[in-house]
Amino acid sequence: MSLVAQTVVSPNYSLKSHETLVIQKIELKPDATVIFMGIENRITGGTFCADKNIYILYPDGKKSRLVSSSGIPVCPEAYKFREPGEKLEFVLTFPPLKAGARWIDLVEDCKDNCFSFYGILLDNALNERINNAFTLADMKEYSRALNAFTEILGDLSGEDSGIEGLLYINVIKLEKEAGNEKKAEEWYGKFRLSGAPRLSSYLKFLNEQGIKY
């Protein structure tokens, strides 16, 4: 790990639990991993808290537990939103990142409405490539977006397998949006055989959106 802090702004990830929960940035310091987060309230009388049992989960299954949090109550205490649309920002601090880690999961281990992010990508160059692919998709440049996502998939190393879910999901959805049902089915089949981490969670996500072959 570098002795200089590294910052990953708006990292990509494969799947998250709460629609309006975001990771604004992650600071990778020699003495700590600091995750800056935010959530937007969408309902009247909404509340939010962070359980003390939050951890970073590494690809090898090892856990790094929360050291401290700021800006958010610890459950069962809860922040009470005043109105829909209000945003809450908070910070979670963990021990220094394990050497060589290129992606992590962030998991809240609690009884009800727990949050999670799977496959958080810590490589800035790869995040930029994925962001460029998303930009093409947003512009409805389906062919170019598909090329960009499939190129990233082809270049992916085993060390970056945590982001496979995101790439496959977007290729499959783009093929469907472009009217290429047969190709979407082919990619779905490849995804099922990919061995991507948390594969069952990603397939469930697609199935819930009516995408199943």
Image (spheres, rainbow, N blue to C red):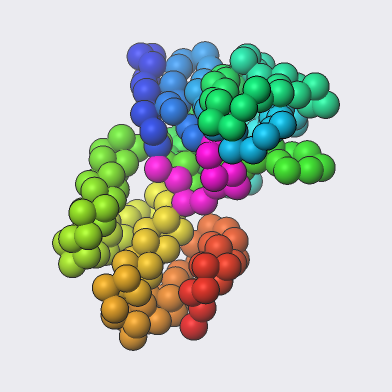
For residue 139, what is the image quadrant? bottom left
Q: Residue at x 60, y 47 (%)?
A: 17
Based on the picture, tell me whether residue 167 belongs to the magenta stretch.
Answer: no
Q: Residue at x 34, y 82 (%)?
A: 181
Closer to us: 130 or 86: 86
Residue 16: give x, y in percent of width and height: 55, 47
From the viewer's perspective, is residue 4 above or below residue 169? above
Numbered label tally = 0
Residue 88: give x, y in percent of width and height: 57, 23
Q: Residue at x 38, y 67 (%)?
A: 173
Q: Is residue 51 left or right of residue 105?
A: right
Tell me where the magenta segment starts and ends, as one range: 12-21
Q: Is residue 39 left or right of residue 166?
A: right
- Which secondary structure class fits the magenta region best? loop
Residue 140: give x, y in percent of width and height: 22, 60
Q: Is residue 198 left or right of residue 75?
A: left
Work out which quarter of the rendered image holds the N terminus and state it. Answer: top left
From the viewer's perspective, is residue 75 above or below residue 198? above
